[in-house]
Image: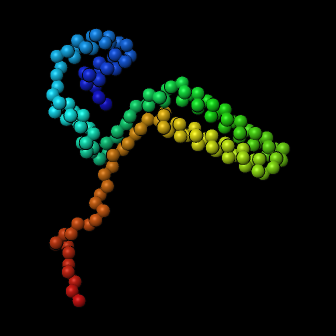
Amino acid sequence: MMDDTITQLLRGVADGSVKVEDARTALEGAEMSEEQMNSAIDHGVFNVAEPGTIVSASLAPSGASGLAMFFLAWGLFWVCYWSFSMIYGLANKWDQQQLSFHLAMTFTTLIMLGIVYLKFILPDTIIVKHAQNKFVPEHQKDWREYKW
């Protein structure tokens, strides 16, 4: 999406292909006034997007973290545990209250997994759509005044 020089240098420093000193020397002569900096920050934040524009963020940085992967593995284990124990209880004619507890724990664990997936792993994608006017503007040529 953004392939300007500064972004390329920052990505190069992040992955180690560009040294920090080399990036500093490359940006040594760059100067920007406060007004230019504010307009650069406001550009893209306050500009109205065109209809049909797809704004997509990359994978959340925490999505590849060990903690998120551990939580998903932990949740998968508990979903299997609660659902298989419920199936075992069905076969052995457990009490209905015990079976409903196992089903509720399965759904609760699945909901927690879904929340973690949506919050930390799934990238954000927004399709910009503009709604049409909610009212019909008055057209003089089509408007008739009926009098009683």
State the count of labels.
Answer: 0
Picture coordinates of residue 34 (x, y %)?
17, 30
Q: Looking at this view, name the residue that lies furthest to the right.
A: 92
Q: In this view, does 93 lie to the left or right of 45?
A: right
Query: Which of these two is toward me, 139 or 108?
Result: 108
Q: Which residue is drawn at 50% across and 25% down?
A: 65
Q: Residue at x 67, y 43 (%)?
A: 105
- The quadrant holding residue 146 is bottom left
Residue located 48% across and 34% down the image: 120
Coordinates of residue 79 in the picture (x, y in percent): 66, 37
The residue lying furthest to the bottom in this view is: 148
On the image, the x and y values in percent for residue 115 come to 53, 40
Against 100, residue 40 (above or below) is: above
Picture colour scheme: rainbow
Task: Tell me the quarter of the picture where residue 44 sits.
Answer: top left
Is residue 24 or residue 147 the one in the foreground? Answer: 24
Write the residue at 55% across / 40% down.
114
Q: Residue 54 sits in which quadrant?
A: top left
Classify residue 84 as left or right of residue 126.
right
Name above or below for residue 147 compared with residue 51.
Answer: below
